[in-house]
Image (spheres, helix red, strand yellow):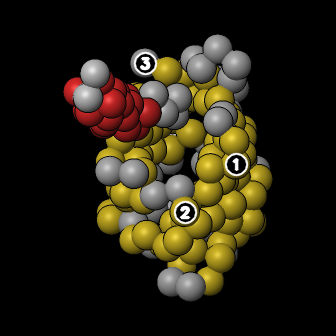
Amino acid sequence: MRTTPRLLAVGLIGVLTGVVPLAQTTNPHVGMWKADVATSKVNVGPALKSGTTKIEPAGAGVKYTVDIALMDGTAWHWEFTANYDGKDYSVKGKSPYGDVVALTQVDARTVRITNKKGAKVLSTQVSVLSNDGKTRTVTTKGPNALGQTIEANTSYERQ
């Protein structure tokens, strides 16, 4: 009888330590996403030719790898790793949205990305997953790194 509480404690620790990694892999935003060019709209600059976003688990947060090509031949590639804590994280590569991001988890299906150039807030992107998790819609508002005011709606399909 004395060993029962000890066994229960050991079993509970085993279950809890098994749940943490599982929780990190159940982030519904994680995956490879391809832009649906036909349904995506932007108010400034050339139209979108193609785009992909890879979102991977990274510690308590995520790593984004983004590649965008525009119809005029402009190409963008950038990456960042960030937690959903509203703190600033550096962007590596060439991003039209600035060199710093801050992520906030609004709810299970919604993430807000605040884009900055240094400490100055430029644009905000709100990424919302569809109920079935197969589509991601990213709405971007505010100035980009070139000072142009953007209003864009980009749809992505899970690959």
Residue 30 placement, left or right of 42: left
Q: Which residue is mark 3?
A: 159
Secondary structure at badge 3 equals loop
Q: Position of residue 32 (x, y in %)?
A: 40, 28
Q: Quadrant of residue 157?
A: top right
Of the 4 image quadrants, the one containing the C terminus is top left
Q: Which residue is mark 2?
A: 85
**How far apart, in angstroms, are the residues tagged by discs 1 and 3?**
24 Å
Give amino acid for label 1: Val
Q: Which residue is mark 1?
A: 106
- Give the class, few, some or many, for how many residues have Cα within 10 Å of label 2's Cα (few <14, many ≥20): few
Residue extending furthest front? 1
- Vertical side of 52 occupied by 98: above or below: below
Q: Residue at x 62, y 83 (%)?
A: 120
- Give the class, few, some or many, for how many residues have Cα within 10 Å of label 1's Cα (few <14, many ≥20): few
Give amino acid for label 2: Asp
Secondary structure at badge 1 equals strand
Secondary structure at badge 2 equals strand
Q: Position of residue 54 (x, y in %)?
A: 38, 37
Sequence order check, earlier mark of 2 and 3: 2
Of the 4 image quadrants, the one containing the N terminus is top left
| Between 138 and 12, the one nearer to me in the picture | 12
| Between 14 and 2, the one nearer to me in the picture | 2
Q: Which of the numbered marks, if any, corresponds to residue 24?
A: none
Sequence order check, earlier mark of 1 and 3: 1
Q: Residue at x 66, y 34 (%)?
A: 109
